[in-house]
Image: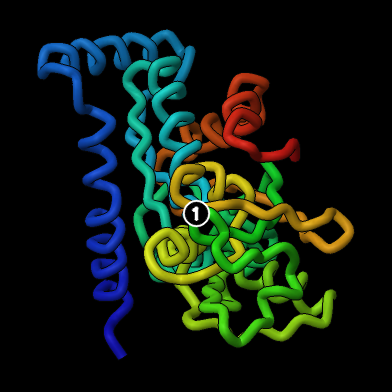
Amino acid sequence: MRPATSRRSAAALAVAALVLPLAAACSNGGSGDKAGSASASGAASSSSGKAPAADLTVLAAASLTDVFKTAGDTYMKEHPGTRVKFSFAGSQALVAQVKQGAPADVLVTANTKTMGDAGSDVGAPTIIAKNRLVIVTQKGNPHHVKTLKDLADPKLSVVLAAPAVPAGNYAAQVLKKQHVTVHPKSEEADVRSVLTKVETSADAGIVYKTDAATAPDKVDSIAIPDAQNAVASYPAATLKDSKQSAAAQAFVKWLTTPEAQSILRKAGFQQP
C-alpha cells in the first residue's frame, strides 16, 4: 500500500488536472490588468467584511457541468476577489477523491446516498436542486422508442450509467419498477458519457432531463411519466478539510438564494 501522503499527492494532481482548464476558461476574455484589478477589488471586499476573497475548488456531479459554469461566473461577478474552479465527474468518483484527500472546498453530488458515503469528510449537506430522468435517442428517433419497455428490445443499442453512478442507480430503479430488463451495450462512468454515446453511436440511453436539454439538436428526448420516474436530489456540502471554510460555506449558502435557484430553474432543474 502507498503511504497516505502519496495518495493525497496523487489526488491533488488528479483534481488539478481537471480544474486548471476550467480556471483558464473562466479567465478568458480578460486582460492581465483586469485580473490585477479584480484581485485588488477582492482584497478591499475582504477587508470590508462583505465576503471572504478565496480560490474555491468545487467538486460537482457531471450533470451540473453547464449550469454550474454559468452559476460560477455569476458568483464571481458578485464576489470580486473570489475565483471558483470546478471539477466535474461522476458523484462516486468525486467522493473517492475526497476520501483520498483531494484539496477541495465544496462537494455537490447527484444523490444523497453518495453524499452520505463521504461521511465525516463533509459538513451537513443542503439540497440545492432536484432532477428527473428521460430517455434519449439519436436525433429523429429512428427506432421509434416511446416507453421504457421499448429499451428491452435486443436489437437496440442501449447505454446506461454504471450502477454506482447516481444516474445509473436511478435508471436501474425505474427499469426494475416497470419490470424491464435491459442489457446495456456499455455502462458509463458518468451521465454525460451516456449522452455522448447516444449522440455518436448508441440508439438510446437514460439521462437526466437537464442533460438532454443541453443537446436538443443532437438527441431526441422522451419523457418518463412521473409515476414511473425517480426524483434525483442534489446535496451540497463543505469539505471538513477546506482551508477556506467561510468562503466555502458562503458559496453553498448562495446556491440556495433566489438568484442561484433562478439559474438552476432555467437549466431545467427543479426546486429542492
Q: Is residue 92 visible?
A: yes
Q: Residue at x 48, y 30 (%)?
A: 71
Furthest toward the left, the residue is 32
Q: Position of residue 18 (x, y in %)?
A: 28, 54
The residue beneath circle 1 is 139
Q: Position of residue 131 (x, y in %)?
A: 69, 48
In front: 59, or 174? Answer: 174
Question: What amino acid does circle 1 point to?
Answer: Lys
Q: Quadrant of the N terminus?
A: bottom left
In front: 143, or 54? Answer: 143
Image quadrant in which you'd find residue 146: bottom right
Q: Position of residue 164 (x, y in %)?
A: 57, 76
- Give the side of residue 270 with respect to residue 80, left or right: right
- Give the side of residue 197 with respect to residue 224, left or right: left
- Way the structure is coloured: rainbow
Q: Residue at x 11, y 12 (%)?
A: 33
